[in-house]
């Protein structure tokens, strides 16, 4: 069995899972992982959620984040069944060194590896949370309020709260079910978008002041110095890359975050058909059509030139 049915049998027939998701987890990653753990728990199955680096403070509002662990060793892994959510290779979850008994993948990224004994990967689905909702229902588990808040957050984050072009009728049907199960959109939106501390806001101001545009492309930076001066960290930069897209003639936005000496994490966003996953793949990263990312080693100028060249090659931008 492969695809959806393969993953559902994997969940039904086994016990003793490690659920994991990508590093720098977003709401889709965390919400999907926690909701699936709660559902497996309802079925009397043992499972743990592992997230490399733990839960970023900006997501501490999600119900049951306390179940997330940030360490796992080979002794434990050998007996565990790995479920990768919202990513499809162990490296993305910082699990590349470990060997698990068996593994399954539920993901919606365009960039695929062939990892996993059971793989359900569908880039047409806007959020992994929608696939997890479907899986939980197929397992016969009733959606609790805690699951609903996690899954609504997952879907909200990956659809720009129902604004991106990936939003479809299924998205609204899923959201409606989650509202019926107790998710409150106003409260979740407030938790997601109106809870910044002053430091995060000053980091955004610093980032916005670095914006440079080249035709339809916007480039911006968050340097290590900015993080230090504002006492902030990488999770605080979530959504910064979206702001330049407010300008009607900007079609691609790139934000370069300094992660070490000559080391950068690059976030890409686009409008319309410009496929950022294709750009990120050239640099060993991946993602979706309108949102992708990669890591780059080199100085900032080299990083920017390399990106502009790729955008020129691929899209004549
Ligand atoms: P963000 O820019 O928010 O970090 O990531 C945007 C999208 O690209 C997310 O779906 C994320 O999973 C994906 N992504 C970001 N960085 C990487 C990377 O280094 N490798 C891969 N495969 N995907 C990435
Ligand atoms: Mn996702």
Image (cartoon, rainbow, N blue to C red):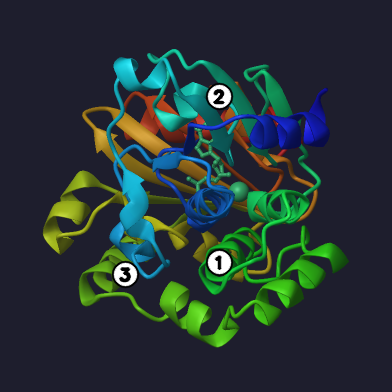
Q: Residue at x 60, y 62 (%)?
A: 151
SS class of the residue under badge 1?
helix
Relative height, residue 23 to residue 176 (above, below): above
Relative height, residue 296 to residue 267 (above, below): above
Report the residue marked by disc 3: 205
Q: Residue at x 74, y 45 (%)?
A: 274
Q: Nearer the viewer, residue 134 or 15?
A: 15
Give the foreground label among 2 and 3.
2
Q: Nearer the viewer, residue 206 or 269?
A: 269
Q: Is mark 3 within 8 Å of ligand 1?
A: no
Relative height, residue 21 to residue 102 (above, below): below
* Cα separation between marks 2 and 3: 35 Å
Q: Are marks 2 and 3 in contact (CB under 8 Å)?
A: no
Q: Quadrant of the N terminus?
A: top right
Q: Earlier in the sequence, mark 3 or mark 1?
A: 1
Going by the image, does 176 lie left or right of 264?
Answer: right
Q: Residue at x 81, y 71 (%)?
A: 173
Q: Earlier in the sequence, mark 1 or mark 2?
A: 2
Going by the image, does 276 lie left or right of 239?
Answer: right
Relative height, residue 157 to residue 101 (above, below): below
Place of residue 241 in the rendered image (x, y in percent of width and height, measured from the top left): 49, 57
Report the residue marked by disc 1: 153
Q: Nearer the viewer, residue 34 or 23?
A: 34
Report the residue marked by disc 2: 89
Question: Mark on residue 254?
Answer: none
Q: Residue at x 44, y 47 (%)?
A: 25
Q: Residues within 10 Å of mark 2 (few under 14, many from 20)?
A: many
């Amino acid at each position: 069995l492969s695809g959806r049915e393969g993953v559902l049998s994997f969940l039904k027939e086994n016990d003793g899972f490690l659920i994991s998701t990508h590093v720098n987890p977003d709401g889709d990653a965390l919400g999907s992982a926690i909701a699936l753990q709660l559902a497996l728990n309802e079925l009397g199955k043992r499972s743990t959620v592992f997230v490399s680096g733990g839960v970023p403070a900006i997501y501490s509002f999600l119900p049951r984040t306390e179940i997330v662990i940030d360490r796992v060793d080979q002794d434990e892994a050998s007996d565990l069944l790995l479920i990768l959510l919202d990513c499809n290779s162990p490296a993305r979850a910082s699990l590349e060194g470990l060997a698990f008994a068996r593994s399954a993948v539920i993901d919606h990224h365009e960039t695929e590896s062939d990892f996993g004994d059971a793989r359900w990967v569908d880039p047409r689905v806007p959020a992994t949370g929608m696939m997890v909702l479907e899986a939980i229902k197929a397992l016969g588990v009733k959606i609790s309020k805690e699951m609903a808040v996690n899954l609504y957050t997952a879907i909200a984050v990956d659809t720009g709260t129902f604004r991106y072009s990936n939003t479809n009728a299924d998205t609204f049907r899923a959201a409606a079910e989650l509202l019926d199960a107790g998710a409150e959109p106003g409260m979740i939106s407030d938790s997601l978008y109106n809870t910044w501390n002053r430091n995060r806001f000053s980091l955004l101001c610093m980032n916005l002041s670095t914006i440079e545009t080249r035709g339809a492309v916007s480039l911006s930076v968050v340097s290590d110095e900015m993080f230090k001066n504002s006492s902030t960290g990488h999770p605080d930069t979530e959504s910064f890359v979206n702001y330049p897209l407010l300008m009607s003639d900007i079609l691609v936005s790139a934000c370069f975050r300094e992660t070490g000496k000559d080391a950068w994490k690059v976030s890409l966003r686009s409008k319309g058909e410009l496929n950022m996953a294709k750009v990120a793949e050239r640099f060993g990263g991946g993602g979706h059509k309108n949102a992708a990312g990669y890591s780059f080693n080199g100085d900032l100028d080299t990083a920017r030139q390399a990106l502009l060249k790729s955008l020129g090659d691929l899209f004549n931008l």
